[in-house]
Image: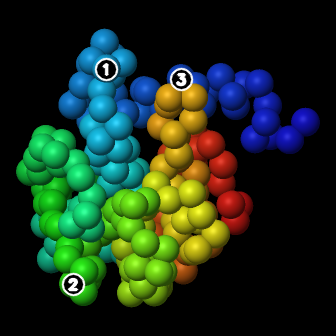
Amino acid sequence: MHYLDSPIKQKLRLLAIPMLMLVGTGLHTALAMAGTSEQALTVAFLYNFLKFAEWPEDPSQSELTLCVIESADFGNELEKIAGRSVQNKKVRIKQLGLNENPGGCQLLFIPGEEKPVRIREWLKNTANTPILVVSNMNEFLDMGGMILLVENDQRLQFEVNLEPVRRAGLRLNSQLLQIARSVRGN
């Protein structure tokens, strides 16, 4: 039996995703999670990706900037994590317009509603830079993306492509990789 498909791994994955979200975010209680919107869950995942990723050391950096493409509709959900502390740094939220430079972002979320040609442009603009790029577009990992958010049986899960993560000089915590639905490039 392959390690990723072991019964223990499957049970850990089922337990770990809600635990990862609850332990790290402080945004919701276990009871509130059941009725939480997809936008709120996505924001909780993004917040936890900030917590479980490592960027090249930059002592002058006092913030971690989570950038979202303007077309991403999160309502007020992003405001709930703005200013929170992650890795002893404040979370800053920044919306990027069509031709804005993603430099200065530590995490970039590209919504799946973005046209594939635009997603490829964002990926080209962030290639080999220390920006963790996340999307919920189905073919995102095949396009060279790093983390794909996937809705499965009314649960939000994620998949990881380690090759572009490594090329960008980033590291993902092993706990995060253990609860991923799949990991490419191991």
Are circles 3 and 1 on residues that touch, CB within 8 Å? no
Q: Residues within 10 Å of mark 2 (few under 14, many from 20)?
A: few
Q: Is residue 52 above or below residue 112?
A: above
Residue at figure coordinates x 51%, y 40% from the top left: 151
Element marked by disc 2: loop
Residue position marked by numbered label 3 in the rendering: 15
What is the number of the mark on residue 70?
none
Query: Of callouts 3 and 1, which one flags the residue occurring earlier in the amino acid sequence?
Result: 3
Q: Give the mark toward the camera: 3 or 1.
A: 1
Element marked by disc 3: helix
Query: Of callouts 2 and 1, which one flags the residue occurring earlier in the amino acid sequence?
Result: 1
Image coordinates of residue 32 in percent, x first then y, are: 27, 18
Residue at figure coordinates x 90%, y 36% from the top left: 1
Q: Is residue 136 above or below residue 151?
A: below
Q: Is residue 129 above or below residue 146?
A: below
Report which quarter residue 166 is drawn in: bottom right
What is the number of the mark on residue 100?
2
